[in-house]
Structures are given as structure tokens and as C-alpha cells.
Amino acid sequence: MRAHCTACLRPLRGCLCRWVTPVQHTVDVLILQHPQEVAQAKGSARLLHLCLPHSRMVAGEVFDETALRALLAGPRQPVLLYPDTPQGSTLGLPPPPPLAPGALSDPARLRLVVLDGTWRKSRKMLYCNPLLQLLPRLPLKGLPVSRYRIRKAHRADQLSTLEATCAALAHLEHDPERFEPLLAAFDGFVSQQLELRP
């Protein structure tokens, strides 16, 4: 077995600790990671988690309802980071509840729930966890072209978990510049992964 870093849990050759750039943020972040992403060297969620002091990352596809309810509980309003679902591709799910008026006005009262996985995997996570379907959603619009050069995307505006979360936090906290160092660290991580390719 290859030796692994005890901090980032990656093989030492692909250790990403040099790119960890702690960024202060007000919105609480809960990352629900698909099990197949846990050992994915190209995944960005581990770097995101290590850079956000007020984040938690839990792996699973179908979560125990009691455990998931506990993760979502508390004084903060959970909001699911998820794109608008085009009509006809809803998988038979009910439409999400609307955000209460003014719900996004105070970042200190929010918990951003992020699904880490491919589009297909994240859609299955939503389908298999009814509690997630009950959360109001935050879709992102007008996104920049992704800087994620190590994974194929079907569209230019399909972002990595780290990029999408940074965009959401910048929107919710009205401070895009604060998350630029994290995006710069992401660029370094991507370049490292490209160098490690055979």
C-alpha cells in the first residue's frame, strides 16, 4: 500500500496540503460526499473542506434519516446548492420549497449543503434522500468558465465542487474577493494533478 498523508488523506505523491489556504467565512458548509469520490485524486472537496474552517464533510449515498436530520438541525437554515432542474428531468421529485423572504439576508444564519459527486451521482443522492428534497435550493446563474482542467464537463459552466461552493459563498456573503485565494490554490492543485498524469 502507498503511504498516505495523515492530513489530506491522499497518497504522499499527490498530497494537497501545500495548497491548503484557510479562508474565513460566515456561512456554515456541509459537504455530503458520494462514496466513490472519497478516493478520487482529482476531486476538489477535500481541499475545499481543509480550507473552510466552518465546514463538515460526510461520505454517503443514502444517509440514515436520523443522522441526516441531525446534520441539518440547528439554528441555521440549510440551503441546498443545486441547479435549477429543467422540466422533464426531475426524476419525479416534487419541486423544492421556496426560500423564505429575507432568508439569505444574514449569512450567519445559513448552512450551505453541498453534494459532492458527478452530476449523475449527486442527482441520485438527492433522489435517495427525501430530507434533501425538502430543502430550499440555491441555484447559481451566470457562472464563469470552469478552471477544472482535469475532469471533463459537458458544459463550460459546470464547475467543480470547490468552484461552485466558492461562487455560492461569494454570493451569500457579498464578498467575491475573499474567496480568490482559495480559487488560486485550486489552480495550483489542478496544475499539480496535470503534472502527475502519466
Image (cartoon, rainbow, N blue to C red):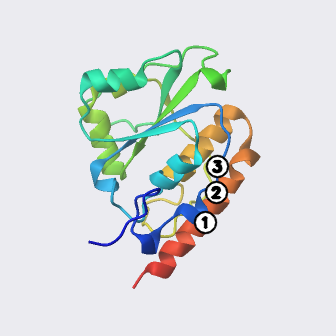
Q: With 122 as the anchor, is 17 left or right in this view?
A: right
**Quick check: marks 2 and 1 in contact, CB under 8 Å?**
yes
Q: In which quarter of the image is the C terminus?
A: bottom left
Q: Residues within 10 Å of mark 1 (few under 14, many from 20)?
A: some
Give the camera-side residue of 196 and 144. 196
Q: Residue 22 carries which label?
A: 3
Q: Where is residue 78 in the image (x, y as percent from the top left)?
A: 48, 24
Give the camera-side residue of 50 and 98. 50
From this view, report whether residue 132 is shown above or below residue 31.
above
Q: How far, Cα to Cα, is label 2 from label 3?
A: 11 Å
Q: How crowded is mark 2: few (under 14 residues within 10 Å), some or many (20 or more)?
A: some
**Quick check: marks 3 and 1 in contact, CB under 8 Å?**
no
Residue 29 showing in the rendered view: yes
Q: Position of residue 194 (x, y in %)?
A: 49, 77
Q: With 190 as the anchor, is 197 left or right in this view?
A: left
Which one is closest to the eye, mark 3 or mark 1? 3
Q: How far, Cα to Cα, is label 2 from label 1?
A: 6 Å
Q: Position of residue 17 (x, y in %)?
A: 54, 62
Q: What element carries label 1?
A: helix
Please report whichever mark, 2 or 3, sits nearer to the chain's N-terminal start: 3
From this view, report whether residue 92 is shown above or below residue 59.
above
Q: Which mark is residue 9?
A: none
Count of marks, rendered view? 3
Q: Which amino acid does label 1 sit on?
A: Asp
Q: Which amino acid does label 3 sit on?
A: Pro
Q: Position of residue 186 (x, y in %)?
A: 58, 61
Q: Determine which residue is flagged by label 1.
A: 187
Q: With 59 as the anchor, is 187 left or right in this view?
A: right
Q: Determine which residue is flagged by label 2.
A: 183
Q: Which amino acid does label 2 sit on?
A: Leu
